[in-house]
Structure formats: C-alpha cells, structure tokens
Image (cartoon, rainbow, N blue to C red):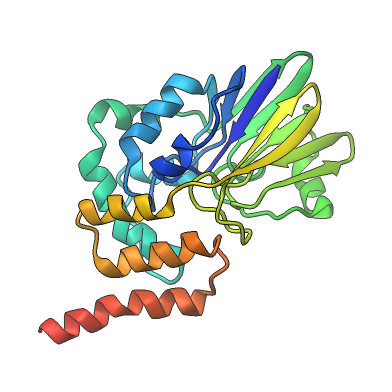
Amino acid sequence: MRILLIADIHSNWPALRAVPTSFDLCLFLGDLVDYGPDPVPCIDWVRQHAQHCVRGNHDHAVAQRIQPKGGSGFRRLAVATRPLHWNLIDPARNKFLARLPITSRIEIDGYRFQLLHATPRDPMDEYLAADSASWRTRTEGVDADFICVGHTHVPFDIEVDSLRVINPGSIGQPRDGDPRASYAIFDRGNVEFHRVAYDIDETLQLMRKQNVESWVVDLTAAVLQSGGRISTEEMDRLSDRKSKSTEGAS
C-alpha cells in the first residue's frame, strides 16, 4: 500500500495541487493554514484525500482565533496573514480545523503509527531536528513502529532504538534550501522522499489578489524562492519596510 505523508501545507494551494495523487492512503501531519494566501482549497483537499489527520500549532491558532504576537522572522508572517485566514475560512471549515486530533494512533498493514505534529512530549509546538539522541528522550514508552511528524519543515527519516521517526518535510514552505514541495511515500516499510516543483509566482499572485501588503508578498517570495534559507536578519530587514512605509505616510 502506497501511503502519502504530507505536512505543513500552510495555505499554499499551487504547491499542494502539484503533489501527485497516485496513492492508496494519505496521512496529514498538521499545519494546513497560516502564511499562505489560499486556505479554502487546501482544507478541502485534505478533507477529501487524507484518511488520518492531526492538528498543527497553526491550525489550532487559526481555529481558536489566537491573536499572534509580534516578534521576528516567521512570527511576523503569521501576524500579517492570520487575519486573512479568519476572513476566508467559513464556520464549517473552521470547525474541521478545531476538531483535528492532537495525536492519532493507527495500524496499517501490521505497522503501528503514531501521528503528531511536533514531538510526543509537546505534540504541537516543540521543534526537534533529526537528532537520534534528542528523539530518544521523547520516544520512551511510545508503543509504535513509526512516529510521523512535521513542524520543522525539513524532511528526515531516523532510527531511534526500535522505532523510526519520519518527517516528510513541508509542502507549502520548505526550509531545507530546496524550494520544491516536499512529501514522502511509505510503502511496505520503505520510505521514499519526493520533491515536486510548483509555480511560486502563482502563490505570490494569489497573495496580491488578496490585497496582502507588498512587504508581506516580498518576504514570502524570499522565503519560498530560497527554500527557507533566509536569515532572521534578512527577514527582519524586509519586514521593517512596513514600519518605514507607515512612518512615511504619517
């Protein structure tokens, strides 16, 4: 059975639309929304194609209408784009986000999976890279063959004692230096990582059609075109254009 593993779509419909649909089962590992311009078709795609889903921190924040706090880096993108999501997502789709489980335990073809967005210790928020020693402290007592996660936007497949931790990377906002949408295929215990190119300019055009501020579009372009390899300083430099334009207008 070919199982599609996807995570971190972040309302990037052109990226999600580029993913092939030649799979038997789909597991979605959180963060459908925030950052991107087009949450509705992304939510609909997951509702149609993903048999098992878990909630990401951005799904939770959008559904619960949590006002993002300012800061630097990606936080500024969340501050800028979350109100757009509140305007676009209707109550039925918002309910879907709000009711996503935080974790899910399933068995497929004799393999035991635990699905979550971040780590077993903090299923929605803890960032943990592909480090077996660090994961070992989080997986003690987990009764599974595979833990499937997202959150870091970086693909990996690591062995931690008797289990494996798989992260398919990000569909809508990769951060490993490769701008192509990232996903994985699980097939009889084997994991294959795949990348697919998509039209980044189409995503940026969708943002402009939504009347997103120009500094947000430019910052998103820098993030997407670099595959997330952009420093916090450069992100802050681009986002500081907002305050400068406000000062100029006053």
In this view, the residue in front, 201 or 90, is 201
In this view, the residue in front, 34 or 25, is 25
In this view, the residue in front, 63 or 108, is 108
Q: Residue at x 40, y 80 (%)?
A: 237
In this view, the residue in front, 97 or 42, is 42
Quarter containing the N terminus: top right
Q: Residue at x 55, y 30 (%)?
A: 20
Residue 186 versus residue 122 in the image, above or below: above
- Total label count? 0
Residue with the most extreme top position: 109
Q: Residue at x 35, y 74 (%)?
A: 239
Q: Answer yes or no: is residue 98 visible.
A: no
Q: Position of residue 192 (x, y in %)?
A: 74, 36
Q: Residue at x 63, y 58 (%)?
A: 176
Q: Position of residue 138 (x, y in %)?
A: 74, 45
Q: Answer yes or no: is residue 245 visible.
A: yes
Quarter containing the C terminus: bottom left
Q: Position of residue 63 (x, y in %)?
A: 34, 39
Left or right placement of residue 191 versus residue 223 in this view: right
Residue with the most extreme left position: 250
Q: Position of residue 12 (x, y in %)?
A: 41, 45
